[in-house]
Image (cartoon, grey):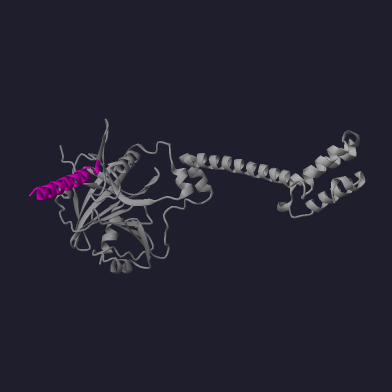
Amino acid sequence: MKKLLTILLCAVLAINCSALSVVNSKYDYTNDNTNITIEFASDSALSAEKQQQIADYMVYGDDGASTYAWCWLTGHDYVYETVLAIEHKVSDLSPRCMRRSYSVETCTKCDHIEETLISQTLIACCPEE
Amino acid sequence: MTSNRMTRAELIRWLGDTIRTETAKPFDEIDYDLVEECGCLLDELMGKSAALSEKEIAERLAKILPESGSAVRKKIKYRKLWKIAVAAAVVLCMAVTVMAVPTWRQAILTALNLNAGDSVDVNGITYVRAGVEKHYNALNDVLENEELDFLPPNIQTSTPRLERIIYSDEIDIVYLRFDDVTISYEIWLGNTDISPYVANATEYHFNGYTTNVVILKTADICTYYSYTIIENDIHNIVSDSLDTIEMLINSIS
């Protein structure tokens, strides 16, 4: 009986952890004028730390520091993902939010990130006021 | 031949011959340390012969002669290797530092033409899924081989030309990329809920389909955002020209 309870508890914890990781695939940035959400796929292969780094890069740009050069010598380990950047309330009327889709190339070993805009459109995200 | 058996004249001749033999070798095989040592000794023997005793001459010659001065020669060689290693380390550090600065890196890659960017197959279509690229000759080959189920635009004119199809299976969107980058074309697979896009849209009828077009003005530019249900998907086309949207939808068959 104890074993069964332990297995059940482990299963519940595992489900909770995976649910938390899915929830954590959106990153919100707000300042006086803009509100941007960077959204990763729920089954993203990127770590939470890497996602945060990419999201910061997409909103604030390159900070100038880089460990790129070491991989330039040893070789990169690239991961490609489609990342969505939703700029909220760019229009007064629905559809109000601008969704830009980027193909993001990132290296798991260094902080190299390269984004390519592949599409942009208005989506119905925020309601009209 | 050893130092104590050579006269001063023989020694001078021998040094001259050694220098001549060494410098006659190919550029990268010349032992410059040997040439330098021989040259210095020759200079001192001819110019300041009185200043060197027989013992000093014997010691200097021992450095040069292969059988007796090998240790010194090896030291000279090691010193040379050490200098090369230090120089290489300095160059490596400089390269790493330069490549670490994004602006410099970009400039270098541009200069070396290593940042050619996305590969473009001028005679076909590049299909991208999860970062993996495949090249096909025609659109139909992509649809058949990749088991994609949507009605694509079938453009007969040379422009805009379909270059890439990017499939994001995690969000069920197919992106069509043309050589005209002002056009955005998304196909929202399995999505027919167009109601959020109807309220403020103008309705057009192209090729038997109902297209809802929303216009967004930024500065002096009008951008047209169109939403059309085609079979089980929404085709979302964005362009600065309504004619382009009409042409693309008319080509769907």
Residue A24 drawn at (x, y percent): 23, 42
Q: Is residue A4 above or below residue B133?
A: above
Viewer-proximal residue among B222 and A87: A87
Viewer-proximal residue among A27 and B240: A27
Residue B100 drawn at (x, y percent): 47, 40
Viewer-proximal residue among B45 and B231: B45
Range of magenta residues: A1-26
Residue B80 drawn at (x, y percent): 67, 43
> For residue B232, what is the image quadrant?
bottom left
Q: Is residue A92 above or below residue B189?
A: above
Residue depicted at x 43% and y 41%: A67
Find out whether residue A20 is within the magenta segment: yes
**Magenta-drawn stretch, dominant element (helix, strand or loop):** helix
Residue depicted at x 76% and y 55%: B25
Residue B116 visible somewhere in the drawing: yes
Find out whether residue A66 is within the magenta segment: no
Quadrant in which the C terminus of chain B appears: bottom left
Residue B219 visible somewhere in the drawing: no
Query: Taking B235 as reference, is B2 left or right?
Result: right
